[in-house]
Image: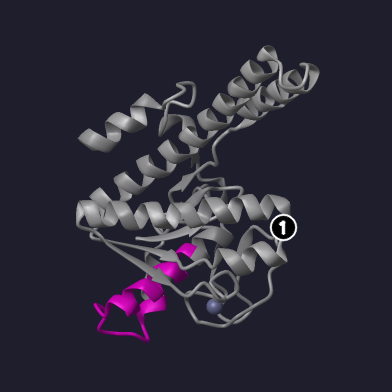
Amino acid sequence: MGIDLGITKFIHDSDGRAFSPLDETVDRERIETRHQSVSRKEHESNNWNKARQRLARAYERLSNKRRAYREALANAYTQRYDAVFLEDLNVGSMMQQNGNSRNIASMSWYETLKTFERFGEKNGCYVVLVPPEGTTKRCVQCGVESKKPLWAREHSCPSCGFETDRDQNAALEVQRLGLLELGVVEDELGLGQELAESTPAETGTSAGSRSSSSRDVIPASTVVDTESPICSRAQSARSHGP
Ligand SMILES: [Zn+2]
């Protein structure tokens, strides 16, 4: 299984399955309110200390929720598949070139990679990291690279005409690289073609088939109980399987 990590979709896999990012609105508001509460208290007073502890708990709650989501996804994928492929994202270099929101995303991708590796070992699944360069630009079917601005959600190859969702193409490309890396593929040249044809996503048609871009994105709340401070459902998924 090839997995593309993103911002608008946290995960998009080569079967066309997508998971939304966590909705952190409530947590961010809670943190903001508690920051204000700390700043209103007299410095180093008892109440100030209490407010600071409450603020720390709000941060911890958000961090637990993120961890529970990563672990639930990593556990499900590494239990279900023999091999999972992800891009070997170099957080250091991404942090330097991108804005703040991308920095946060980069850190979360990095932690996600580590979580997949950990659960891969636990569940007996190969977790293979592939070179990230060009996975978005390169057409999985023919290998030709074309420039894509960030807002272009579709992959439409000027060379071979392959059309699909942008993230779908990237996930397939990650899958292709992973299969090559594992050395389990016999026909290296026909692999991209085969993967492109096997993709469940169909775009560019108006004949009523669901396009990959309109395919449902699975909400994070169905993976982890986002209202629970300790995300108990994810915890139980971790110990008993999905
Ligand atoms: Zn192409």
Closer to us: 168 or 232: 232
Residue 219: percent from the left, percent from the top? 49, 35
Residue 168 against residue 185 in the figure, above or below: above
Q: Residues within 10 Å of mark 1 (few under 14, many from 20)?
A: few
Q: Main secondary structure of the magenta part?
A: helix
Magenta span contains residue 176: yes
Residue 193: percent from the left, percent from the top? 41, 77
Quarter that holds the N terminus: bottom left
Quarter that holds the C terminus: top left
In this picture, residue 48 sits left or right of residue 209: right
Closer to us: 10 or 64: 64
In which quadrant of the rendered view does residue 70 lie? top left
Amino acid on which the number 1 mark rests in the picture: Trp
Is there any visible trace of residue 233 in the rendered image?
yes
In which quadrant of the rendered view does residue 56 lie? top right
Residue 63: percent from the left, percent from the top? 51, 36
Magenta span contains residue 50: no
The stretch in magenta equals 171-192
**Which residue is painted at 25% across and 84% down in the image?**
186
The residue labelled by disc 1 is: 151
**Which residue is painted at 35% across and 27% down in the image?**
233
Residue 89 against residue 27 in the figure, above or below: below
Residue furthest top as drawn: 47
Residue 165 against residue 242 in the figure, above or below: below
Q: How many marks?
A: 1
Closer to us: 41 or 138: 41
**Which residue is painted at 69% across and 50% down in the image?**
101
In which quadrant of the rendered view does residue 189 lie? bottom left
